[in-house]
Amino acid sequence: MRRGRVPSARGIVSVRSLFIASEKRVSEMATKTKQATILGIDLGTNSTVFQAAVDGNPIEHDRDVFPSLVGYAKPGLVPGILPANADVLFGEDALEYRLHLDLRWPLADGFVDDVETCQAFTQFIKQQIKSEDGSELWAVVGAPANATPEKQKLIRQAFAGVVDQMLVVPEPFLSAMGLRDDDRIGDSSYVDPTKHSLIVDIGAGTTDCCLVQGYFPGADDQISVPLAGDAIDEKLCDAMKKRYPDVKLTRVTVTRLKEESSFVGDPQPVEVKFYVDGKPKKVDVGDILRESCDILTEPVLDCIRQLLSRCDSESVVQVLQNIIVTGGGSQIRGFGERIEAILHEEGYEDARVVTPEDYRYLVARGALKIANNVREDQWQVPL
């Protein structure tokens, strides 16, 4: 694959045109584009984030992060159990009323798994976006870097009838764009993440490691491993069942335990309270959590080593200084520090691992930057 280009699948455009647009602020952007509400969307397995703007001006929303979850009412519910006797609930409402719902996750391993459910969810997201009556919605949507044309097609199908125009762009590039400090471009001391970075995106189904060096990543620039947040949940759940067989755990409970208390590094106690046969019981799950989370350490290190070996010798140092760990897995306490320490031990003295505090917004923010500068002829109509 030639550098500076991506597969010619419909809905993906050349990086050169988009990158130049973001650099030079294309002045001839069509009037129709300016009149539309422009969106950057990170459609994720566990959560979905959007950012919006009109004519380059951001639109503030009370809420722009939602669990990627749809709940359908169970048959035979007594009236008044669900708000407004709804047949379907989304996001946090679906979590709150989960005992009375059949829960469905529209995405799996970062990709659309159930088109119909995903369409219902994206319609819900559309309803949360502030836009003027009659205003069209034009969106740049992130996709895993290894998305095949078939997977890209499913993403576009999920937005059919939701947005009027869209583009699908690799998430690692959008993460780099979201992290980029536009005010420091041209500063000789600043390492631009869109030109020199190694993105480690730990999602729910996969961990995607990708070199970003000024162009959309190609096959040689990325490694995806089917080991991420869901794998930690499974290991944690299995370990809990073996040690505490009387404790009944749901997927939601296990995920929340991981999100609130996960860590790697030195052992430490983590006391939690469960109910066994209706009675409260405190248990220490520190070692179980640490061991479960540590399953990511070596695979991530191996991906980093492989990608560094593919860098030009002149760019290795700059890439090493911009190893960016993002995604939900980046919130495992001590994970970035552990990766950096091991790299230092192995002789990568210039290694610097960054875990952005606003990791949730990187893809959506980068997508909005791109969306604000796409020419009208580059947009595509969803399938």
Image: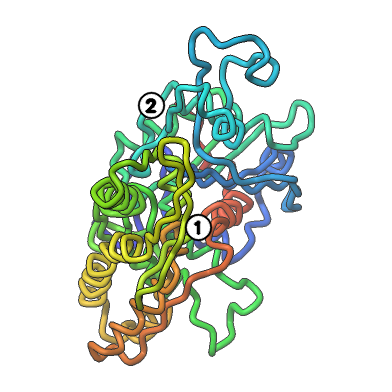
When the figure is inspected, residue 112 is found, relative to residue 83, above or below; the finding is: below
Which residue type carries mark 1? Glu
The residue identified by callout 2 is 114
As helix, strand or loop, the secondary structure at mark 1 comes to: helix
What residue is shown at x 54% (from left), y 56% (from top)? 360
Quarter of the figure with the C terminus: top left
In the rendered image, residue 142, in percent from the top left (x then y), is placed at: 46, 47
In the rendered image, residue 125, in percent from the top left (x then y), is placed at: 61, 34
Instruction: Give the residue at the far top of this rendering.
Output: 76
Q: Is residue 239 left or right of residue 326?
A: left
How busy is the neighbourhood of tag 2: few (under 14 within 10 Å), some, or many (20 plus)? some
Q: Quadrant of residue 294?
A: bottom left
What residue is shown at x 23% (from left), y 69% (from top)? 298
Q: From the viewer's side, name the closer residue of 97 and 17.
A: 97
In this picture the colour scheme is rainbow
Which residue type carries mark 2? Asp
What residue is shown at x 40% (from left), y 79% (from top)? 337
The residue identified by callout 1 is 260
Q: Quadrant of residue 218?
A: bottom left
Image label count: 2
Q: Give the label on residue 5, or none.
A: none
Specify which label sits upstream in the sequence, 1 or 2.
2
In the rendered image, residue 338, in percent from the top left (x then y), is placed at: 35, 78
When the figure is inspected, residue 309 is found, relative to residue 283, above or below; the finding is: below
- Real-space CA distance between mark 1 and mark 2, rounded to the nearest whole angstrom: 28 Å
How busy is the neighbourhood of tag 1: few (under 14 within 10 Å), some, or many (20 plus)? few
Answer whether residue 197 is visible to the viewer in this image: no
As helix, strand or loop, the secondary structure at mark 2 comes to: loop
Q: Which marked residue is nearer to the observer: mark 1 or mark 2?
A: 1
Answer whether residue 39 is visible to the viewer in this image: yes
